[in-house]
């Protein structure tokens, strides 16, 4: 067996034990692993993380992304021996990550107070629907519920229809990202003080955090934002317009940019028209303005509109899907998508590590391993010192 790729990035001296499943916890682990952390993912034996079978298309490929760079082991956390294996891993770790319903870890003897007795420096990252405290804490909580409670779901979709969803589990990803931010801040604190702490990241509060001024707008002006579809109220022009061969996004809502747009479409007088002269006026007359722009775009191809907008310095662009991403020269120049071939998928590609760092850039070392417990021997045998016989026995007893 060849040696594993050397870890690169700013977190190569950090070990994280990931106990979560699905997205909210594992995406945090993915971010850490992408930045070089040694992430040991613990899954239940015989079934694994449900993400192994999630995805769309002909094959479930989400796992190859969310578990990349992680070493995967199995442990039955409902059994004392499985819990003890995890305690041994946590004893020498920097962080432990979980996204079970609050109270579950304590029931298994793996709560923060239990873990800090064996590792006072441990940073415990806890991701949940509603947080570890409060009257809703022990409710089951998925991303869609957190997005609704945090206010995002109400604003998604067309105004004449029921609230929609983003098409992605954005609440989970936000919670995982904020959890990662908190954990890195806690790591800095530990470097100064030597003490660990708990990161309590809820999905609903992660959504709430990105809800702009919706709360103060209501408190001060009794204003409640409503669904606005493809546009933002009072921000114009900023919309999707028809071209002869597709649709195209133009965002020219700032005064000087709008003036450049007017010149480009051959109607420089619009910049001085009282209906469109100011930001407020354009917002009030959005429908009329969008109609004028659409009459111009629909007689041209997307490529023609794009060239003219770029020449004029007007923000504009195509609506990207996977095919456009794979062919786009800027994606290629930025290496935003990388080749990650596997034995089963020799042409596999996926998004690269982000953000980019000038000194300590992380990298994708391997995609998610399809084999459940692929690193049991390496971790339990090589690092905890369990014998082959012990590993066979633990597997037979469904502990690993």
Image: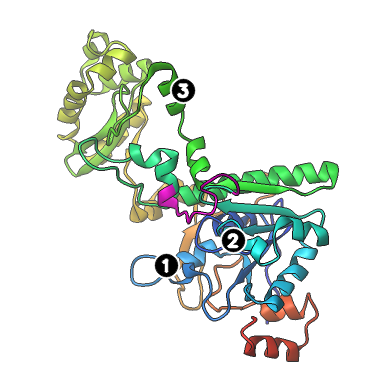
Determine whether the residue tagged by mark 2 lies in a helix, strand or loop. loop
Residue 272: image quadrant is top left
Q: Main secondary structure of the magenta part?
A: loop
Start-end of magenta stretch: 132-145
Q: Can the viewer see residue 232?
A: yes
N-terminal of the pair, mark 3 or mark 2, is 3
* Label 2 crowd (10 A; few <14 / some 14-19 / many >=20): many
Observer-side mark, 1 or 3, equals 3
Based on the picture, tell me whether residue 277 belongs to the magenta stretch.
no
Asked if residue 140 lies in the magenta stretch, the reply is yes
**Residue ID at (60%, 62%):** 104
Q: Tell me if mark 3 has few (under 14), some (14-19) or many (20+) residues whose alpha carbon lies within 10 angstroms of its own.
A: few
- Label 2 near label 3: C-beta < 8 Å? no
Pointers 1 and 2 in contact (C-beta within 8 Å): no
Q: Is residue 153 left or right of residue 116?
A: left
Q: Quadrant of residue 261?
A: top left
Looking at this view, is 383 or 312 the one in front?
Answer: 383
| Nearer to us in this view, 263 or 171 | 171
Where residue 35 sits in the image (x, y, percent)? 65, 53
To which residue does mark 2 refer? Answer: 364
Horizontal side of 112 relative to 25 (left or right) equals right
Task: Please provide percent x and percent y for residue 338.
Answer: 51, 59
Q: Crowding near pointer 1: few (<14 within 10 Å), some, many (20+)? A: few
Question: Dot 3: what SS?
Answer: helix
Which disc is residue 216 wearing?
3
Mark 2 or mark 1, which is nearer the start of the sequence? 1
- Cα distance, mark 1 to mark 3? 39 Å
* Mark drawn on residue 54: 1
- Marks 3 and 2: which is nearer the front? 3
Identify whether 9 is placed above or below 22.
Answer: above
Give the farthest residue toward the front: 135
């Amino acid at each position: 067996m060849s040696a594993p790729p050397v870890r690169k990035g700013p977190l190569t001296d950090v070990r994280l034990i990931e106990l979560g499943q699905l997205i909210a916890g594992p995406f945090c682990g993915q971010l850490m692993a992408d930045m070089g952390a040694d992430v040991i993912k613990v899954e239940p034996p015989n079934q694994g993380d449900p993400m192994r079978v999630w995805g769309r298309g002909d094959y479930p490929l989400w796992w190859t992304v969310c578990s990349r760079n992680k070493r995967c082991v199995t442990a039955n956390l409902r059994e004392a021996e499985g819990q003890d294996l995890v305690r041994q891993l946590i004893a020498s770790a920097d962080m432990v990550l979980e996204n079970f319903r609050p109270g579950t870890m304590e029931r298994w003897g793996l709560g923060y107070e239990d873990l800090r007795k064996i590792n006072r420096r441990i940073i415990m990252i806890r991701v949940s629907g509603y947080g570890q405290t409060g009257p809703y804490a022990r409710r089951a909580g998925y991303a869609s519920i957190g997005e609704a409670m945090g206010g995002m779901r109400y604003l998604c979709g067309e105004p004449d229809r029921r609230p929609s969803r983003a098409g992605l589990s954005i609440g989970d990803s936000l919670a995982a990202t904020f959890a990662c931010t908190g954990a890195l801040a806690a790591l800095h604190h530990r470097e100064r003080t030597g003490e660990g702490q708990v990161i309590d990241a809820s999905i609903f509060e992660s959504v709430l955090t990105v809800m702009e001024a919706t709360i103060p707008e209501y408190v001060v002006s009794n204003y409640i934002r409503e669904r606005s579809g493809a546009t933002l109220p009072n921000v114009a022009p900023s919309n999707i317009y028809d071209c002869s061969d597709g649709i195209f996004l133009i965002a020219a809502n700032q005064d000087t940019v709008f003036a450049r747009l007017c010149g480009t479409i051959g109607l420089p007088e619009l910049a001085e028209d009282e209906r469109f002269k100011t930001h407020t006026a354009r917002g009030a007359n959005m429908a009329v303005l969008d109609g004028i722009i659409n009459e111009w775009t629909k007689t041209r191809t997307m490529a023609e509109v794009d060239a003219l907008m770029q020449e004029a310095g007007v923000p504009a662009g195509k609506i990207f899907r996977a095919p456009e991403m794979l062919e786009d020269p800027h994606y290629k120049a930025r290496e935003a998508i990388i080749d990650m071939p596997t034995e089963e998928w020799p042409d596999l590609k996926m998004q690269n590590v982000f953000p980019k760092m000038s000194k300590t850039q992380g990298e994708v070392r391997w995609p998610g391993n399809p084999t459940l417990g692929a690193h049991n021997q390496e971790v339990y045998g090589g690092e905890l010192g369990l014998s082959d016989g012990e590993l066979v026995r633990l597997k037979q007893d469904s502990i690993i």
